[in-house]
Image (tube, rainbow, N blue to C red):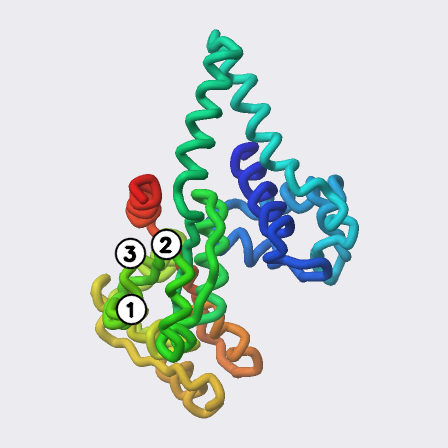
Amino acid sequence: MATNTTSVKEAIKDLIVKNRWSVGTRLPSIRELSDQLQINKSTVHTAYKLLEEEHWITIKHGDGAYVASCSEELDQDESIWDGVRRYVTTARLMGRSMEEVQQTFAGAIGDVYRKPLMRIAFVECSPYDLEGICNELRVKLPIEVTPLLVDDVLQKPELLSEFSLVCTTYYHIQELLSLQAQYPGKILAMHHLPNAKSVSEVTAYSKSARVGLVASNQQTLSLLRGFLLMYGYTHVQGVCDLDDPHALEQVFAASDVVVANYAAVSALHGIACAVPVITIQFHVDEDSIEHLRSTLAAL
């Protein structure tokens, strides 16, 4: 628990320091962030409380957590020096001499600063999924990741030229590979799949159940349909036109259970139906995380 709490806290501090979340930015709710990262809500709650105690954020009860104005005055080198101190302390406990530690740092500094600065982007079509993926990568690796929307990249391929590595989901890999004439850098595809909790909730229903699908975009609708077919559900119908209440009501009326991605759930408010709704949460699978980690190490 302590490690997860520390990782979440430090990742949020890093986003603030690098001005990814500026003063006054509303942080994801505890539930949203715990769902995105697949961690316990109490872990996020503890991380937020610690950040408030350290004056990085302000928690407004009933409203949410916001980046505090005084966070601009906090030392931006704090996280760097914390890491340096931890390394030096560990090295000393292991019996390393001061000269050995100095040589290690000198070698690392030379290796890093002789290389061009590495920048990483993630490309996705859904703004909600894009932010969730970038947050997940920042916490799990941790690295700084720039979010880019697929449509923006297809319209302006030159956006990719700023990055050493461009990541995307397997769904969009062909679109990005088609741009390699304009972007000769490395492109890495990653699995973005329903998490174990979501799968368990869905597979608790009989395979003969009529399953309705509601998704915020056609890509997610196709992915969810394929996911259900893979698990043996054949009575499936879906809709991604969230502005059509009649179509949504038809899906509900013909279903025993409705499966929706998180970004589509808000469109279901006001739909009169007793059918249960399962909210599907996605995550980057561990094999993809390890593949990205090894790719970064080789660059």
- Residue under label 3, please give it: 186
| Residue 93, image x, y percentages | 52, 11
Q: On residue 176, which mark appears?
A: 1
| Residue 11, image x, y percentages | 56, 45
Q: Nearer the viewer, residue 239 or 216?
A: 216
Please report the residue visible at 33 percent of the width from the left and 47 percent of the height from the top: 292
- In this rendering, is residue 70 above or below 149? above
- In this rendering, is residue 39 above or below 260? above
Alpha carbon of mark 1 to alpha carbon of mark 2: how far? 14 Å
Q: Nearer the viewer, residue 88 or 196?
A: 88
**Do the CB atoms of the residues marked 1 and 2 lie less than 8 Å apart?**
no
Sequence-wise, the earlier of marks 2 and 3 is 2
The amino acid on which the numbered mark 1 sits, given as a three-letter code, is Leu
- In this rendering, is residue 160 above or below 65? below
- Residue under label 2, please give it: 164
- The local secondary structure at tag 1 comes to helix
Alpha carbon of mark 2 to alpha carbon of mark 3: how far? 7 Å
Please report the residue visible at 33 percent of the width from the left and 50 percent of the height from the top: 285
Sequence-wise, the earlier of marks 1 and 2 is 2
Which image quarter: residue 190? Answer: bottom left
- The local secondary structure at tag 2 comes to loop
**Do the CB atoms of the residues marked 2 and 3 lie less than 8 Å apart?**
yes
